[in-house]
Amino acid sequence: MASCALAGGLLGGTYGLVSTPEYTATSYVVAVPTEKSDPVAALGFAQAYGRVATQLAVLGDAQVWAGVPVATLRRSVRAETSPDAPMVSVTATSDRPGRAADMADAVARALTRHADASADDTRVELRQFARATEPAEPSSPSPALTGLVGASAGGLLGGLGLLVRPAGRPGGPSGPAGPPRPPRPYRARPAPRPGRRRPRAAVTYTTELVTDAGRFAELAADWTGLYRRCAAATPFQSHAWLHSWWLSYGRPGRLRLVLARDGGDLVGAAPLMRVHRPVPALVPLGGEISDYGDVLLDDARGPEAAAALARGLSSAAATALVDLREVRPGAAAERVYDRWHGPRRRVDDSLCLELPAVPLADLVARLPSAKAQQRVRAKLRKLDALGVKSRAVLPDEVEPALHRLLELHRLQWAGRNVTAEHLRGRFREHLVRSVGAMVRAGDAVVTEFRLADEVVAVDVTLLARRLAGGYLYGAHPGLRERRADVAVMLLDACAGQVCDGERRTLSLLRGNEPYKHHWRPRPVVNRRLLLARPHTAPLLAVALGGAAARRRGKELLRRQRERTGGGGT
């Protein structure tokens, strides 16, 4: 053991004497938020810039200022970030002190140049905080230290050799040889009893990534079957709605459908698309015109299907964040979130208001006072006195009815702050295409309201297994001039159509408008589920910073409106 320690010490000391000393220098850059950003966003972008500091795009520029090739920079430079401060340290190692400092400063300079190019989008600037100083002493270990390490290693190896040295055994130096041990007899494995089944092999799930729009269209039957088997699904996860949305709003090359199968059965599906701003992410299809986002899971398959879909999502995400917006509490996406292996966060999203799916008489009975109930009944009598009649349109009447809806919607909002997207041609095409198919499948109802022979209002109600929602309506301004309460008229028709089967909820969808609160709805906050892989954790930090900034902005706007007496809708 002593000889091993001596040999190790000699070898270690010799290595320290003959090896070339190395010098290390560090340059620092700091992320600074602009006026339209905040420190949380700066911290997130600092993490992201730390990831790209040693990538080819940055090192390609740095080689000019450092005077060394990219390969040398890639071997010699590393970048580190802090979880608490928006700072990136760039450290370079070289056999010459001056070159180490030059390389560190060159990479820091190139990184700030790249950050400046995208500062208008990120609203975060990257500035050099401290230049690298030329090191006075090498950072490599001294001969004394390498000799000490070598001696310790030699002693350790010598001790291990003593521990594993063979002990005395029969036939060895410590005793005579014993008789040989008889071989263990072979025992045949008993055959299974007649009539007893072998245990079924564990179910194995496969995942698939679909990026072709034509393939998306071919999935209609399988997708619809899965949609029917997922009780938490909302109408915005139906194939008719999603595929139509993609035809109107999708961009080539960005479709990402993650599928999970058990054999040939579709048991999970995540309808997503790839976006590049503000960070690379997979986001739900449906966009801003869809009130709920979710995935689909076969309720009969248990947690295994959710785990398989989570694995497929992780693989499809690659270098992007999975950003599931507007997830209703209890949605299938929450089961995927629970089985996600990697960084994840859940934050609040939009507010929705919900009523029970019961007839209007029961909704009236929920009102807080007899006087409020009497007012609603008086409004219903007013509608009857005017002669307003409603009827659900037939499937072949849907297209002209929807064109009339959008025309009435335009008249209704003339001179006011209308949602501009509802007036665009692509929305019209999507609405006609998707709702027409949904009416034929029993997933939507289009209701016309007539006064004499004129259609004065049209409403679209979307239906799912457990939820229905009044999506969009158009009403002629003349109804209000006749003192007809349009909200009561629409709710009366909608409640009569949705209170059947398993349906429990009549959603008033997103928005906190005062007229909705007259019915004492239950506030339900949608969730935003953010899923990352370990190497995309900086993108998660950026998304969280942006969400926090938006929340603060909305709160400041609300306070300003309260101070000026403007209220809010």
Image (cartoon, helix red, strand yellow):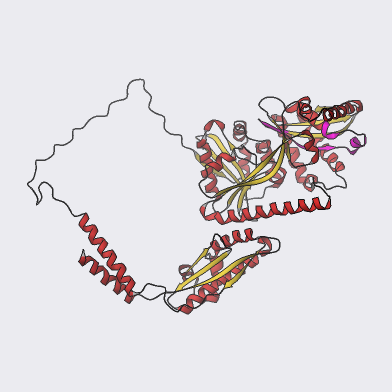
Q: Is residue 336 above or below residue 502?
A: below
Residue 161 visible here: yes
Residue 328 coordinates in the image, percent (x, y): 65, 39
Please say whether residue 481 is one of the residues in the magenta stretch: yes
The stretch in magenta equals 462-488
Residue 206 coordinates in the image, percent (x, y): 49, 40
Q: Residue at x 72, y 26 (%)?
A: 499
Quarter of the figure with residue 240 = top right
Is residue 472 left or right of 258 when viewed as pictured?
right
Residue 276 visible here: no
Q: Is residue 66 above or below residue 359?
A: below
Quarter of the figure with residue 496 = top right
Is residue 56 left or right of 289 when viewed as pictured?
left
Q: Quadrant of the N terminus?
A: bottom left
In this view, the residue in front, 520 or 335, is 520
Q: Quadrant of the C terminus?
A: top right
Q: Is residue 112 above or below residue 285?
A: below
